[in-house]
Each structure stands twice: as structure tokens, then as C-alpha cells.
Amino acid sequence: GIEIEHVNFAAEYKDRVFAEFLREYAAGRTPNPDVLCNAEIKFKAFLDHAVRLGADRIATGHYARVRERGGRHELLKGLDATKDQSYFLHRLTQAQLGKTLFPVGELPKAEVRRIAAQIGLAVADKKDSTGICFIGERPFREFLARYLANTPGPIKDERGRTIGEHVGLSFYTLGQRKGIGIGGLKTSAAAGGEHAPWFAAQKLMASNTLVVVQGHDHPWLQSLALEAGQASWIAGVAPGAGALSAKTRYRQQDAACRLLPGSNGSFVLDFDMPQWAVTPGQSAVVYDGEVCLGGGFIAGATPHAHALPVAVGA
């Protein structure tokens, strides 16, 4: 007996999310479109539409929680730690959180499926969605190639030796192992002759060079600090400098860190332990226990202090 209205936000998505997604990839960064989609579509375009209809609140299926404390709204992690989606919601504001309900945030995913089956929902056993929504099942590189130019260039190792050719820096992300195209070259003096896999470690945009290293734990893939820009804090103000925790990618354990203020809306995170493949364009999201404080977009990271990269020839 509840009326349903279908609303198409494809134009807003194209302008506010997809265009920015392509700009970031073209600049050599790796954006997370889910973060922008939440900030610009679900909790802006959709919320604004709902308010115009006279709605008091919107409800979404995110695994997160909202708590009001001292006249302010806090964003909390979902109780199901394996499904928590607060990372994707870190750019929400007080006004947005004040009009939002997260009905499944208090439940484990298994209980949500049980309830869905009990009331006869056809999607009760649907496989969890993964990847980027607007790409679907097609290969990611194939999708990007429809929109971004292929500009091949050299693949070099940490000693500056050319060991292959990449198809365009936009099509690689830091920490990437599969699809680099040099799987046949296994041995390396730096790796002690071991048959260690290759990983993308640096993208040198000025010389159109992809730098790769061998071994998951190579020092060039480890960072003790990062700087993030375009900071967005849920409380409306930046938290004070001090000991907190952060994620530099989704599905990552919270890592102990210290928050330091930067300039022009940026901040710095110093980590207790090196973080793997910190990637420009991704979100650095800051937590105080179960409370998501906000975050920003990673601009750059400092490699492990004992293994600063040597100059790689163009």
C-alpha cells in the first residue's frame, strides 16, 4: 500500500561522478566512485528530491549507524565488521546524517538475509555485489579504454632497466600484480634471484614510465606517512591532532596513526606500521574507535624511510 516513485539520476551521475572518475584516472590516480556516488547522488541529489517530496528522512541499505550525541550526529561503523561501509560514507555532513536512517546497520548480513527470505524477497540469496556498479561484469581495462587514450611507455625496474612496455599509465594502479604484462621475467638481482611476482610501485607521469618491483613486501610498496587533501569532517571541524586509526583502502584493518593538520584543507597521517600500496586518489578515512570522523583523498605517500626510491631514468 505504499506508493513507489522511480527517479532517474543518470544525468547527475554522469556529471558529478563519472566525469570526475575519468579525470582522476587520466591524471594517473585511482579514484573510488562509490565515495563520490554517496556524497553527490544518494545523499545529495536523492536526498534533495526526497525533501522536495515532503519526506523527513531517507533510508539506505548501507551497513553503518548514526548516533546523536551532544546535539551532533556521529557516523558509526556497522555492527557487522565484515560488511561495514562507513568508509564509503566518510564525506557525509551533519545535515545529511540528520536526515538518514540505516536500518540494517545494527544487523549482521546473515540476519538480513534471513529476514529477507522470511518475507519472501527474491534477492534474499543474491550474491553480494562487488566491483564498480556502472561497469558490470566486463573487464575493467576494456571499459576504461573506451574513454581514455592508450599511451604506451616503458616499464622499468628499481634499477632503471626497461623490462617491458605498458599500455598507458591510466590502466594501472599501485600494488597491482595481475595484468602488468611481464609475468615471464621472473628473476632479479634485487630479489636475490627468487621467482617473486612483480607489482606496480610508481607511476612517473612526466616520463610516462611505470616502475615495478618484485615481492609483495618490497620497501617501495610500504609507506609510513601520507598526505590527503579535500578533507571532509563529519563533525564539521577537523579533529584535534592525536592518536587515531585510519584505513587507506576498503576491506583493510584499521591502522594506528597520528593525525597532523596540513594546509589548504589537507592533513597528514603518520602510521605506527608501514602501510601497503598507499594509492593516490583513494580515500584515507580516519576513525576514533567505532566512530568515523571523516577523511580525504590521498595525494601522496612517503615510502619506507630505509628505502627511498632512487632516480629512475626517463
Image (tube, helix red, strand yellow):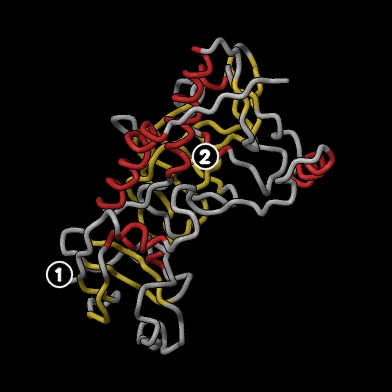
Above or below, 115 relative to 28: above
SS category of the residue bearing label 2: helix
Say which of marks 2 and 1 sits in front. 2
Q: Which residue is mark 1?
A: 314
Report the front residue among 170 and 224: 170
Q: Residues within 10 Å of mark 1 (few under 14, many from 20)?
A: few
Q: Amino acid at mark 2?
A: Phe
Q: Quadrant of residue 155?
A: bottom left
| Residue 10 image offset from top left, x and y in percent | 41, 35
SS category of the residue bearing label 1: loop
Q: Is residue 141 left or right of residue 78?
A: left
Q: Quadrant of the N terminus?
A: top right
Q: Amino acid at mark 1?
A: Ala
Residue displayed at 49% across by 25% down:
46
Q: Which residue is mark 2?
A: 88
Residue displayed at 60% across by 11% down:
71
CA separation, marks 2 and 1? 37 Å
Above or below, 39 relative to 56: below
Q: Is residue 108 left or right of residue 300?
A: right
Residue displayed at 80% across by 40% down:
120
